[in-house]
Amino acid sequence: MSASMAGFVVNDALMKTVSDDLPLFQIIFIRGLFASVLIILFAWARGALRFGFAVRDRKLVGWRLLSEVLSTVLFLTALFNMPLANAVAIIQAATLSVALCAAWFLGEQVGWRRYTAIVIGFAGVLLIVRPLGADFNIYALAALAAVASITLRDLMTRQISRGVPGLAVTVLTSLTITTMGGIGTTFSDSVPVTWEHVAVLGGGSLFLLVGYYAGVEAMRVGEVGSVSPFRYTNLVWAIVLGFAIFGEIPDLLTWIGAAIIVLSGLYTLHRQRVRSGA
């Protein structure tokens, strides 16, 4: 799971390095072409290219694809315009919002301890976003909107039948996002792409595949309660890469807010494990 998180964050960092040269949708489209080919080959090798979903699952997958497209656009918009660690830290709140919404809409049991942890975790988000501060801008709102989209995505994912191959859904997701990026490029100015851009975006798609593969294997082999906390290692990678590549050093409030989010999320996962008897 730690390798999975590293793959995703390295992909994010590589996307951010070309954000000053290429427009958003062009980046999404080019990376999507590479990622789709790699994911399709990977899914084919594992025999997961089966798309005969039931009607109920088709609707859920459709909503999941829509929320994935929205979260991709919103998160990359935030990522390209704010420090890497800040953007990744805010996204960590999705773990808390999914737990909250699962209780409200899916009837999952959440006790007062987890509710308290969720509220404290959202307080950590406010320390990073600082809605009343001078640095608050539309990009912080984009990161928060990405959290909402990720929450919708995960709620839809939880309801998809177990017989639906996860890699098949991943293939559809990649193709949908790539198509969206292609459509978006027709409404924005295109910029000439260099071989350096191609190498960076191709490398990003490779790390994206590493993230998907390692994450799938971690959840298949390891116990969910033991593996899930390691999702928060992506914040460590974001801080390290943010400093190494972009010279970004989180300020004190961001450190405190990130720590609160991580601790709240870990406690929420712990209480979920206790209630499930794991």
Image: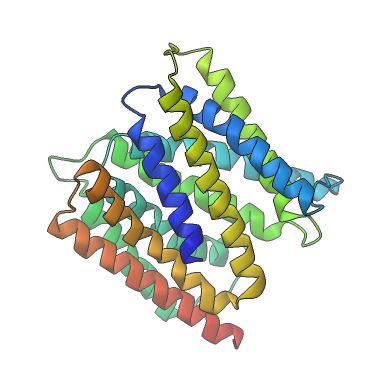
Task: Name the residue nearer the viewer: 49 or 91.
Answer: 49
Using the rendered image of the protein, determine whether residue 62 is visible from the camera's viewpoint: no
Residue placed at 62% from the left, 68% from the top? 219
Q: Eyeballing the image, is 85 above or below 118? A: above
Question: Quick check: can you spot residue 149?
Answer: yes
Q: Position of residue 207 (x, y in %)?
A: 50, 47
Residue 17: % across, % down? 33, 34
Residue at 45% across / 18% down in the picture? 193
Classify the position of the C terminus by image quarter: bottom right
Question: Number of callouts in the render?
Answer: 0
Along the horizontal axis of the image, is 123 left or right of 207?
left
Image coordinates for residue 229, horizontal then vertical, percent = 45, 72
Please name the colour scheme applied to the rendered image: rainbow
What residue lies at 48% left-to-right and 81% top-to-bottom? 271
| Residue 76 falls in image quadrant | top left
On the rendered structure, is 14 left or right of 149?
left
As drawn, 138 above or below 217: above
In this view, the residue in front, 168 or 278, is: 168
On screen, residue 179 above or below 119: above
Q: Position of residue 183 (x, y in %)?
A: 58, 19
Question: Quick one: 87 or 161, which is closer to the camera?
Answer: 87
Q: Nearer the viewer, residue 7 or 68?
A: 7
